[in-house]
Image (cartoon, grey):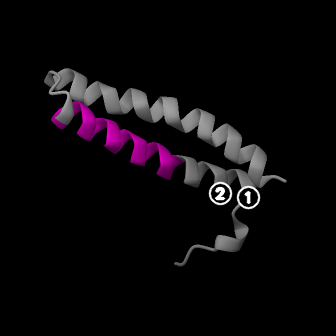
Amino acid sequence: MLMDLESWTPSDKARRIAIAVAIQFAVFVFVLVWIALAWPWYAIVLAPLVAYVLAFYPVFGVLKKLIRR
Protein backbone atom coordinates (compact mmCIF):
# COMPACT_ATOMS: atom_id res chain seq x y z
CA MET A 1 0.00 0.00 0.00
CA LEU A 2 1.37 3.37 -0.99
CA MET A 3 1.39 6.36 1.30
CA ASP A 4 -0.84 9.24 0.26
CA LEU A 5 1.46 12.23 0.61
CA GLU A 6 -1.36 14.67 -0.12
CA SER A 7 -3.15 13.66 3.07
CA TRP A 8 -0.34 14.84 5.37
CA THR A 9 -1.39 17.66 7.63
CA PRO A 10 0.98 20.60 8.27
CA SER A 11 1.68 19.10 11.70
CA ASP A 12 2.67 15.77 10.09
CA LYS A 13 5.08 17.52 7.75
CA ALA A 14 6.61 19.56 10.57
CA ARG A 15 7.01 16.46 12.74
CA ARG A 16 8.70 14.44 9.99
CA ILE A 17 11.13 17.23 9.11
CA ALA A 18 11.87 17.82 12.81
CA ILE A 19 12.59 14.11 13.28
CA ALA A 20 15.03 14.18 10.35
CA VAL A 21 16.81 17.28 11.69
CA ALA A 22 16.97 15.88 15.23
CA ILE A 23 18.37 12.54 14.03
CA GLN A 24 21.04 14.30 11.98
CA PHE A 25 22.00 16.41 14.99
CA ALA A 26 22.07 13.35 17.27
CA VAL A 27 24.35 11.49 14.86
CA PHE A 28 26.63 14.53 14.71
CA VAL A 29 26.79 14.62 18.52
CA PHE A 30 27.43 10.86 18.63
CA VAL A 31 30.42 11.16 16.30
CA LEU A 32 31.68 14.25 18.11
CA VAL A 33 31.52 12.62 21.54
CA TRP A 34 32.90 9.30 20.35
CA ILE A 35 35.78 10.38 18.13
CA ALA A 36 36.66 13.98 18.95
CA LEU A 37 36.07 14.11 22.69
CA ALA A 38 36.72 10.45 23.61
CA TRP A 39 34.20 10.51 26.45
CA PRO A 40 33.27 7.38 28.44
CA TRP A 41 30.86 4.87 26.89
CA TYR A 42 27.83 6.01 28.91
CA ALA A 43 28.27 9.59 27.72
CA ILE A 44 28.54 8.32 24.15
CA VAL A 45 25.11 6.71 24.59
CA LEU A 46 23.41 9.50 26.56
CA ALA A 47 24.67 12.57 24.72
CA PRO A 48 22.92 11.78 21.40
CA LEU A 49 19.66 11.01 23.22
CA VAL A 50 19.76 14.34 25.00
CA ALA A 51 20.75 16.09 21.76
CA TYR A 52 17.78 14.51 19.96
CA VAL A 53 15.31 15.74 22.55
CA LEU A 54 16.89 19.19 22.68
CA ALA A 55 16.79 19.49 18.89
CA PHE A 56 13.38 17.96 18.17
CA TYR A 57 11.05 20.10 20.26
CA PRO A 58 12.32 23.56 19.26
CA VAL A 59 12.58 22.60 15.59
CA PHE A 60 9.11 21.05 15.65
CA GLY A 61 7.63 24.17 17.23
CA VAL A 62 9.24 26.51 14.71
CA LEU A 63 8.35 24.35 11.71
CA LYS A 64 4.80 23.91 12.91
CA LYS A 65 4.34 27.67 12.96
CA LEU A 66 6.10 28.18 9.62
CA ILE A 67 4.28 25.43 7.72
CA ARG A 68 0.81 26.46 8.90
CA ARG A 69 1.18 29.86 7.21
Left or right of 26: which side holds 42?
left
Q: Residues within 10 Å of mark 2 (few under 14, many from 20)?
A: some
Q: Which residues are magenta?
A: 19-35
Residue 30 place in picture, x, y as percent: 27, 37
Q: Is residue 10 above or below residue 35?
A: below
Q: Nearer the viewer, mark 1 or mark 2?
A: 2
Q: Reply yes or no: does residue 28 show up in magenta.
A: yes
Residue at image coords 71%, 72%: 6
**Numbered mark located on residue 46 in the image:** none
Residue at image coords 37%, 39%: 26
Residue at image coords 48%, 31%: 53
Indicate the secondary structure of the residue bearing disc 1. loop
**Numbered mark located on residue 9 in the image:** 1
User: Do residues under tags 1 and 2 come within 8 Å of each other at their CB atoms?
Assistant: yes
Counting every numbered tag in the picture gives 2
Residue at image coords 72%, 46%: 64
Q: Which residue is mark 2?
A: 13
Residue 28 place in picture, x, y as percent: 33, 42
